[in-house]
Amino acid sequence: MTVPILSTQADVSLEIAAIADQHDAASPGAQPRLDYTPYRSAILRHPTKDLHHADPETIERWAPCFGPQDVDPLEADLTIQHSGEPIGERITVTGRVVDGDGRPVRRQLVEVWQANAGGRYIHQRDQHPAPIDPNFTGAGRILTGDDGSYTFQTIKPGPYPWKNHRNAWRPAHIHFSLFGTEFTQRMVTQMYFPGDPLFALDPIYQSITDAGARDRLVATYDHNLTVPEWSTGYRWDIVLSGSHRTLMDDEEPDA
Ligand SMILES: [Fe+2]
């Protein structure tokens, strides 16, 4: 397969549209495509073989362990990790983690990480010229409650360029990891914000060709979560199994 090195957004958008047309004609399935050519950087790093089953007990001899006592409630506030206030729009993000029958998934370790308000990660590989915020690291974690709910405070992340093609920009998003009860159950996904103009242009978001499945990755603005003179709020539920489950990054390769 020959892939143009410096495709434009117009090239990529045409490919996205062509694949969407094929999908509409051929299959109504919600499975994201791993061999999704508009997602240039994943062409050589998506799984090409079936996954191996692993014995959880064998894995757990080597995998990290944690208990509820290891997660401090303050880790759910990404805006208080430094001496000053981070720049940007303060938001509350909340929702429930449930199984396919709507039952709460209790004591679930939820880890989140994200770019700052300017779209910059504190990471050596992110060198694009947006400012690093000295008061924002962009990582936190939460344990779900008895009702499966999680809540954290953060700064709304900005979109960022990612070199998938020329002038490629990711919609604003927050990465989520759900640890499960065993290391082999860990799942990773992304939450998006409603109305983002970059949705149509983003090969990662569009690699899920079923519109309903894509929509389930988008949070809902909830005015009841706002704090007057302080913050706005978004709600996002995560369904771990069943026909309305939230698609995960091993199905939808990540950037
Ligand atoms: Fe990201």
Image (cartoon, rainbow, N blue to C red):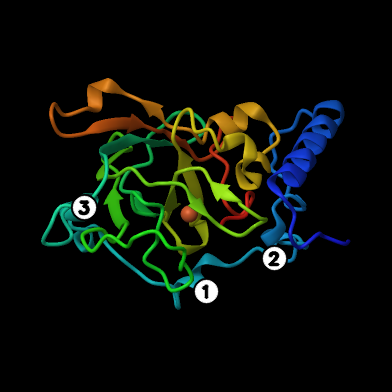
**In 3D space, how far apart are the residues under numbered discs 3 and 2 (Cα atoms)?**
35 Å
Mark 3 or mark 2: whose residue is earlier in sequence: 2
Nearer the observer, 151 or 68: 151
- Callout 3, which amino acid? Pro
Residue 243 shows in the view:
no
The residue that disc 2 covers is 45
Q: Is residue 59 left or right of residue 219?
A: right
Identify the image quadrant of the N terminus. Answer: bottom right
- Judged by depth in the image, the label closer to the viewer, 3 or 1, is 3
Check the image and report above or below for 61 versus 237.
below
Check the image and report above or below for 255 versus 213.
below
Q: Which mark is residue 86?
A: 3
Q: Position of residue 12 (x, y in %)?
A: 74, 46
Q: Residues within 10 Å of mark 3 (few under 14, many from 20)?
A: many
Q: Position of residue 34 (x, y in %)?
A: 72, 52
In terms of image quadrants, where is residue 207?
top right
SS state under label 3? loop
Label 3 CB-ligand 1 distance < 8 A: no
SS state under label 2? loop
